[in-house]
Structure formats: C-alpha cells, structure tokens
Image (spheres, helix red, strand yellow):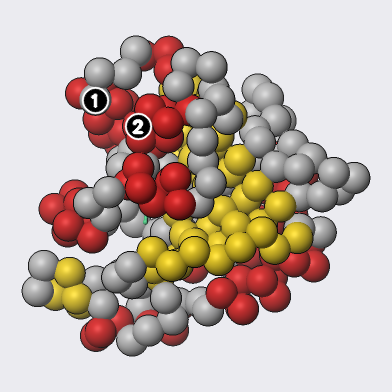
Amino acid sequence: MNHSAKFPAAIMPDADWWQALWPDPEGVLRALGIGFGMSVLDLCCGDGHFTHKIAHIVGGVGRTTALDIDPEVLVQAKDRAARAGLPPTSIRWLECDASNLIDKLPSQPEYILLSNTFHGVPDKVKMARNVFEVLKPEGQFAIINWHHRSRDDTIVLGEPRGPETKLRLTPEQVMDVVLPVGFKLHGVVELPPYHYGIVFEKPKTG
Ligand SMILES: C[S@@+](CC[C@H](N)C(=O)[O-])C[C@H]1O[C@@H](n2cnc3c(N)ncnc32)[C@H](O)[C@@H]1O
C-alpha cells in the first residue's frame, strides 16, 4: 500500500481520549441531519467511531459506505461494527485515497461526512470539488472541525489534544473554500466542547 497520499496531521487519535471527547457519536450524527434510509459516505472514517452509528441510524433501507486510506484503521472499524452487532454487509468498506473519489464509489451518496480531517487536507478546494462531483444533487456535505482555538485550551483527559493551533479553521474559513465550488450553506451546528459541524448542500441543478 502506498501511503504517500495520506494527509498530514490526520492520524487516527487514540481510542481512549477520542471516546472521552465523543461519548455520543449518534447524537452528533443526528444533529447533523443524518437520518433513516439515507445513503451516507463516511469519508476518512478512521477506526469507525462514527461509522457504525451511521449504519445504525440509516438502517437496512439506507446505505453506509466507509472509506479510508489506512488498512489498519479499516480493520479496527470493521471489528467495531461487528462488535456493535451489525451484519457484515451493512457497511461497504473502501480502502482508497479520498483525494481521488471519481470512479471509486459504486453509487452516488446523498450525504458525505468528513470528520476531523479537513484541517489536514493540503488541497482543500480540490477535496470540496471532488465531493461536489460525487454527491447526489440536493445531497449534503458535512464537515466536523475543531474550533479555531489554541491547542493548549482543548484539554481532553488532562492533556492538550487535536491538531496544531495553526491548522484549525473557523466556519467562515471553511465556507470561503467550499461555497465557491457551488455548494449552498445549510447550517452550522455547535458540537461541544471543542467542535462545530458545518453542513453544505449541493443544489438540484449543480
Ligand atoms: C483524525 S482521523 C478521523 C477519523 C474519523 N473521521 C473520526 O472523526 O473519528 C483522520 C483519518 O483520515 C485518514 N486519511 C488520511 N489521509 C487520507 C487520504 N488521503 N484518503 C483517505 N483517508 C485518509 C486517516 O487514515 C485517518 O483514519
């Protein structure tokens, strides 16, 4: 596996403090508008902290696809989904580079989640264009980001956590990248203690 395309500063965090920071992944996903019957792509899914809850929410009628470049985290994600009691076929797993999605997806998702990764993507405009291209018309693109706060102030289990301060983006900085690609803003959701979610929509004619 060639890891040269792996985004810098986007490594899967240790499960202990990640669980402490995100004790209710299902609540986060529902706050971002993921619901029963949707077809959702968890882009850069990591160890599946959110993925198995997506599959739970969308149910058998919906479709969950999870993509990551790192085979080791995909093994952990599959194991987590199995431990959650999901049938093996309930999630489609893709080991590939998120910078190049065209022709990688078997079908057009109606919702794409990019959680805790956008700060580390070197070419953010290209990523937004890529997502726009593969998303269904009227589909949604949600980005979960650390707030633009000093890393020293984002303490989890007694230690500063998350990306370097200089990599953190405000919602306005994300909009400046994503809106010119053709998306409309759907909404911004606070995800305490340290995150926000920003949801964009692809217009019908986009
Ligand atoms: C900080 S983790 C976030 C995981 C998950 N989204 C979450 O919030 O729990 C970032 C993930 O992005 C993945 N990643 C980094 N570069 C990638 C690339 N070029 N294509 C696909 N996945 C990538 C890493 O392997 C890692 O699992």
Q: Is residue 126 left or right of residue 15?
A: right
Question: Residue 80, how many percent across, how many down?
Answer: 25, 30
Q: How many marks?
A: 2
Nearer-the-camera pick, 160 or 137: 137
Instruction: Tell me the number on the disc at residue 66.
Output: none
Mark toward the start of the polypeptide (2 vs 1): 2
Instruction: Tell me the number on the disc at residue 52.
Output: 2
Q: At x 51% / y 29%, what residue is drawn?
A: 36
Alpha carbon distance from label 2 to label 1: 7 Å
Q: Secondary structure at mark 2?
A: helix
- Determine contact: label 2, label 1, CB under 8 Å: yes
Q: At x 58% / y 43%, what residue is drawn?
A: 112
How busy is the neighbourhood of tag 1: few (under 14 within 10 Å), some, or many (20 plus)?
Answer: few
Kindly indicate the quadrant of the structure image that contains residue 183.
bottom right
Instruction: Report the quarter where the N terminus lies.
Output: top left
Label 1 amino acid? Ala
Q: Which residue position holds label 1? A: 84
Q: At x 71% / y 52%, what residue is drawn?
A: 201
Q: Secondary structure at mark 1?
A: loop
How busy is the neighbourhood of tag 2: few (under 14 within 10 Å), some, or many (20 plus)?
Answer: many
Q: At x 51% / y 41%, what residue is drawn?
A: 34
Question: Residue 83, how many percent across, how many down?
Answer: 20, 23
Q: Respond yes or no on whether mark 2 lies under 8 Å from ligand 1.
A: no
Nearer-the-camera pick, 138 or 182: 138
Question: Residue 146, how many percent across, how many down?
Answer: 40, 70
